Image (cartoon, coloured by chain):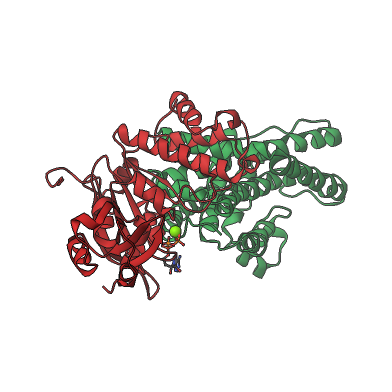
Chain colours: A green, B red
Amino acid sequence: MIAFYTLLRKEVKRFLKVMMQTIVTPFMSSFLYLLVFGVSLGSKVDNLHQVPYLAFLIPGLMMMSLMNNAFQNSSSSIAVSKFSGDLEDLRVAPLTPHHLLLSMGLGAVVRGAVVAIITYIVGIIFYYLQFQEILTVKHPLILIYFILAGGFLFGLLGVCAGFWARSIEHIAAFSNFILLPLLYLGGVFVSIESLPEWAQKFSQLNPVLYLINGLRFGVLSVSDVSLENSLLVSLLGILIMYLLGLLAIKKASFNRW
Amino acid sequence: MTHKSELAALEIENLTKCYGTFEAVKKVSFNIFPGEVFALLGPNGAGKTSIISIISTLEKLTSGSVKIFGVDIEKETMQSKRLIGVVHQEIVNSGFFDVTEILDFMSGYYGIYKNSERINYILHKLGLYEHRQKKVKQLSGGMKRRLMVAKALVHSPKLLLLDEPTAGVDIQLREDLWNFVRELQSEGMSVLLTTHYLQEAQELCQRIGILDKGQLKLVGQTKEIIKQFSLRKILIKTKTEESHYEANAFFEKKDQGYYSYFLPDNNYLGKLLQELSLKAEDILDIQTQEGSLEMAFKKAIEMKS
Ligand SMILES: Nc1ncnc2c1ncn2[C@@H]1O[C@H](COP(=O)(O)OP(=O)(O)OP(=O)(O)O)[C@@H](O)[C@H]1O
Ligand SMILES: [Mg+2]
């Protein structure tokens, strides 16, 4: 228990020490997305699911920054530790793979949640300026669930990537060529209903779609997919990533680069 | 001195380690007794680090077994990890945290929550207390090495593994560090270390093992090994100086009236005197000097196995 708590504390302290990179940068990018897409472009776009485009975009961006930052947190924590050699400490100390997965996953949740909440706050400010109305959360518990689940899932993904990577480029490649497309095609910016039919079929295979829409349902009570499916995919995703994480810690190397 | 009845601090049996097809450690077996300081010596690439990495579970063993106070490192990994502290050969450079934070985290990993008393004690002992608020980057090489030693000690392990802890450390600090090791030993800690400073190993370690190309060539009491494998030096001062004293096969040099000879073993002195046709009354003085570990080391490495 103490070991788990210590490792969690270390993960959180680490990202707080590089706040510029871990909190301010994501804040800037959310701010710009909301300004350019939500406010400027949004005024020329039809309502999606009977909500203004800006409102539609806010939960999408929340989930996107949540996933990105959760992934970055655990993967770069491991990458940096591999670089300096102190990942070996985690191997030598009596920490089980469960300790590592739970605390690194939760550390990622904390950073992801902070960034998601910042995005939400920036979002409601823009929304208020435009519509003189506060964008309230329709289903807070569902929102909280998807913040936890999305952060944890992508934190675990980051752990896997971190352990398996043989260089920092591996992680960058994974994040650019796999993660980014999944996020962009997962319905952050548009409802999949506006896509051609074949592209809709394709999108339905993208697990990220279910997570983004789950969180969107929590905030707006609208979604491209059913809530049951979102819940199912998130739970299944966590299960699979957890198992992959166990495998990664067992097989992959703690040695320095 | 046999400790058969006691549980060994470390028991290595037929340990083999392969990297791909390369056999870095070949069927190595030895024990370390509780409270003992044991040195694993050998040239570069002998396999010392491989053995230490296996004990600390950084590397997986290929075959054989390792037990720490009877606890098998493969079967009861978590339990065995608690018993050991390890200082790896390569310097660690972590960037985000300062010395105190690092030691605090390290304690936490071992399930110790508030450990500042022990941490401060170690920091003082290792001369790091003034540097406790520095980041690792701001420490000198020798300080980093000492930080690694500190990290290995936060949880008061029963067996300490030191892989070249004195590489890159100046003479004064080296002495301090070895004195600290002696102190830890007096508190009951068992120590396995590697070093290339043979003179220091000779002074510090009760037993040593000599490893070469993955094979354990010798293991035993330091004194015994020196006695057995190094040449003893005999210095003789004679009444008269004769040219045939220098013609002997074991002759080394003549210095300040003393003739010196290297003798292969203890039973050779009589034979030497005979060869030199020296009688008791011809001799003014005889001195003997024990050989060094360095000499024994070289001989052991040359030995065919
Ligand atoms: N990860 C690895 N992959 C392949 N070969 C390795 C690996 N680690 C060590 N070796 C090889 O195993 C042999 C033993 O290496 P090891 O590091 O154990 O030697 P050592 O006795 O510690 O040497 P030194 O005194 O230089 O530290 C060497 O030939 C080395 O090249
Ligand atoms: Mg070595």
Which quarter holds ligand 2? bottom left
Compare residues A145 and B181 and report the one nearer the observer: B181
Rendered-image quadrant of the C terminus of chain B: bottom left
Compare residues A17 and A125 and report the one nearer the observer: A17
Q: Which residue is depicted at the point 42% across and 34% down?
A: B154
Say above or below: B58 vs A219.
below
Compare residues A155 and B238 and report the one nearer the observer: B238
In the picture as drawn, the residue positioned furthest to the front comes out as: B240
Compare residues A112 and A228 and report the one nearer the observer: A112
In the picture as drawn, the residue positioned furthest to the left comes out as: B5
Residue A108 in sight here? yes
Left or right position of B188 against A222: left
Coordinates of residue B251 in the picture (x, y in percent): 33, 67
Coordinates of residue B86 in the picture (x, y in percent): 41, 46
> Which quadrant of the figure has residue B53?
bottom left
Coordinates of residue A94 in the picture (x, y in percent): 37, 43
Left or right position of B289 against B150: left
Residue B147 in sight here? no
Coordinates of residue A178 in the picture (x, y in percent): 62, 63
Rendered-image quadrant of the N terminus of chain B: top left
In this figure, what is the number of numbered marks? 0
Left or right position of A176 against B257: right
Say above or below: B229 vs B304.
above
> Which quadrant of the figure has residue B235?
bottom left
